[in-house]
Amino acid sequence: MKSFASLYAEIDSTTRTNEKVSAMVEYFSKAAPRDAAWAAYFLTGHKPRQAVPTKRLHLWAAEAASLPMWLFEESYDAVGDLAETIALVLPPPEGEREDVPLHAWIEERVLPLRGLGEAEQKARLLGYWAALEPAERFVFNKLITGAFRVGVSSLLVVRAIAAVTSIDAKAIAHRLAGEWPPTEEAWTALVSPEGGEMHASKPYPFFLAHPLDGEPDALGDRADWLAEWKWDGIRAQLVKRGGESFLWSRGDEPIAHAFPEIVAEAAKLPDCVLDGEVLAWKDGSVRSFATLQKRLGRKDPGKKMLAENPVAFLVYDLLEFEGEDWRERPLHERRQKMKDVIEAIPGGSRFETSSLVRAPSWETLALARQESRARGTEGLMLKRRDSPYGVGRTRGDWWKWKVEPYTLDAVLMYAQRGHGKRASLYTDYTFGLWKDGELVPFAKAYSGLTDDEIREVDGFIRKNTLEKFGPVRTVKPFMVFELGFEGIQLSKRHKSGIAVRFPRMLRIRTDKKVEDADTVETARALIGGAE
């Protein structure tokens, strides 16, 4: 546990990717296989469920620290992160300490906590806290609260393991894709030159596009690039091997249960792996993301849900065909094979192929892009014609050329502290619009500001708090922000009657007064253009 806590601290203390990778290389080169498996599992975004209820953590930590509850709560309010607060207020560890391996902490201590009765849970937790140094307590607390996360991407973890094993990074990324158990056997297979036998369901790592910087003519000859519409759906891979079919989201989550009709129709396909987008689809056209949302989170959508909210799988790449990896072949060759596979399906299906946007020059393509809103798309995808299918967000071959976001001017109403390095600052904001002479909550946003702007807003919030409700502060209505967002729709769940997609702050409108902020009616007027 000590070495993993040190790794966490090293990663958390730097923003330099090479230093993060070096720290992981050092750890993985020395870690025992069972520990390395759990470390890789957590570093790639997996985490255990919350083991102890939050209320109990507050009570027991205050008791262990001999603090009155009000003082513990004030400490928590000042720090902003529960795991860190507990690690800071607890007394020093008692007696001699045994450095228990990471796998033992997880398998014998963290995971069993969830199933214990309250008295036994408390006794064990107090004993664990007493046996750990503050840095180890912090990581342990992150694990038992279900809030473990650290500033590395899966791609950096792949780089580190590839460096330790001298195995190609693409092979490591493929082995880590999908679901895998954090066991010694799994780690041994991961770092083996042969790789071991992979389950038929295993997807490939997704290839991701970068936002286009500047104008597209900087990319070179238009003839070297393919353009497709960028739809707003759920990125997914359909894997069919050995007659079995599987559907994976970009987050490596199996989603076949949510879209059984797609998996059922995969029976018509040969063995292959297809990359594409799950879209709400009816009468031959794409429906809004709001329609698709009705299908999300359902383990077993009923017949009525399937009939009223049908979906299709829009395919735009082929990664494997009849057991052969096609990812290194040029995109235009993969697309042609993709079209051949889909068009050969007898009697039609829920599989559609992503069509190319025909425009001979960058100028005419820019004109076509202006149709994005009317078509219900987010803009265009630009892909180098001869590009291989890469791993992760690699610059150069795939770009997303999105249309400008919708914008509204809204008033800061509520604020909460952030997470991680922003835990001591108010960075999570709720904004309101005018409706019948009153401000009503409209959207939440936490990204888009510079560090200096965050400190400025944090200072304003602290000086202009009107009320406190737990971690939420009601703020004097004074600051106006321009918010950008990708989509807007009607919503019965929101007080304003509308909901937006991917809201973020574009700028602070110091030139506007509160009464100049937009209204709910103005927001509703945008909905027609978003449908």
Image: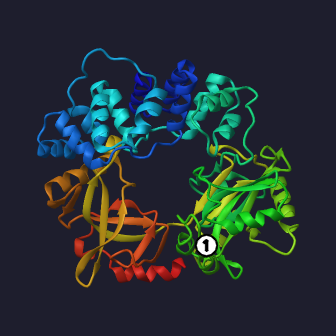
Farthest-out residue, top: 96
Label 1 packing within 10 angstroms: few (<14), some (14-19), many (20+):
some
Left/right of residue 106 with respect to residue 34 in the rendered view: left
- Identified at 49% across, 67% down, the residue is 486
Amino acid type at mark 1: Ser
- Nearer the observer, 242 or 322: 242
SS category of the residue bearing label 1: helix
Q: Quadrant of the N terminus?
A: top left
- Identified at 20% across, 66% down, the residue is 478
- Identified at 27% across, 43% down, the residue is 57
Res 82 → quadrant: top left
- Identified at 56% across, 53% down, the residue is 213
Left/right of residue 361 with respect to residue 242 in the rendered view: left
- Nearer the observer, 181 or 488: 181
The number of discs equals: 1
Q: Position of residue 53 (x, y in %)?
A: 32, 48
Residue 104 in the image: above or below residue 235: above
Q: Position of residue 136 (x, y in %)?
A: 35, 28
Res 108 → quadrant: top left
Asked if residue 313 shows in the view, the reply is no
Residue 48 in the image: above or below residue 302: above
Q: Quadrant of the C terminus?
A: bottom right
Q: Position of residue 292 (x, y in %)?
A: 57, 71
Asked if residue 458 shows in the view, the reply is yes
Q: Which residue is mark 1?
A: 372
Residue 297 in the image: above or below residue 170: below
Q: Position of residue 427 (x, y in %)?
A: 30, 52
Res 421 → quadrant: top left
Residue 159 in the image: above or below residue 243: above
